[in-house]
Image (cartoon, grey):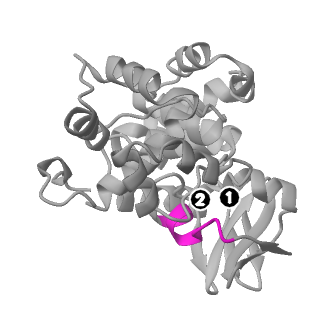
Amino acid sequence: MFLETNDIDLKLMLMDSAQSFMWMQADGGYGAVLHGRAVYLKEDGACLYAEGMDEMSLRRYLGLARDYDALRAAWRGDPVVSRCMDACPGLCVMEQPAWETVVMFILSANNNVARIRKLTHALQTRYGETIETEHGAFYAMPTADRLASLSEEELRALGVGYRAPYLIGAARMVRDGFPLDALMDRPYEAAHAELLRLPGVGDKVADCILLFGCGHAEAFPTDVWIERLLKECFGIKASNRRALAARARERFGPQAGVVQQFLFHAARMRIFENNELLTPAD
């Protein structure tokens, strides 16, 4: 299937924007297993070539239903937001399966992008479904049932460290009926509070899950990059990051999380010259 679009940068979204860590480069494109099917994506000029996914599902997964031109126009009067958006052409906020985001962002705690990806791939290749394709072997995220059956020692052998009991505990809660898929339809505050019940899920991880896996566009993940940018560029301060995220949601509105993704990636790109807030290591 070919999908006409000039709106996305696959490498940026799948590999570089810290939204997803499960895709692997394959045959000039990118491969993964989603919902039990091997999916292959590749940019081809102004088109996106896709195997294993219908157009509606693909548009939803890649976040293409959102009107980014309208969003850019709405923020054109804000020099910081506008500059960040202009610096990240082709960036969209993805809508991934919620369980995949739970695993990836539990792994993200106190980790960098390269190591999160390495650990995610280790889980996929060791315990996820493997499908052989003409483009190579593609891997799924291990299911909650599969992770729930593992021991801490088995997970620690992959290098996940202290996150092993968190992954197992979260998997067992999901296996036993934790209402993960229902969080999309709950109000943000209620969904956030529910996620905090999962082992290894704090405020930032909960917001990442809600933004990238549950469709809550107002969720505002807050880390050192965002904290410094909010303070230096917007004058937004608070005594802790939960309060800071709340103020950011008030400032940026119902699509605060979408704005956050542009701010976050632009900060990581160090687009603001001579600004010390851009010094933390990735």
Q: Which residues are magenta?
A: 6-15
> Which residue is nearer to you in this view: 107 or 274?
274
Amino acid at circle 1:
Ala
Relative to 149, is 226 on the left or the right?
A: left
Q: Residue at x 69, y 44 (%)?
A: 97
SS class, disc 2:
helix
Q: Which residue is mark 2?
A: 124
> Which residue is nearer to you in this view: 250 or 3?
250
Dot 2 or dot 1: first in sequence order is 2
Q: Is residue 125 magenta?
A: no
* Residue 109 image position (x, y, % from top left): 36, 40
* Residue 10 image position (x, y, % from top left): 59, 69
Q: Is residue 16 above or below residue 267?
A: below
> Which residue is nearer to you in this view: 146 or 190?
190
Amino acid at circle 2:
Gln
Q: Residue at x 26, y 41 (%)?
A: 229
Relative to 277, is 174 on the left or the right?
A: right
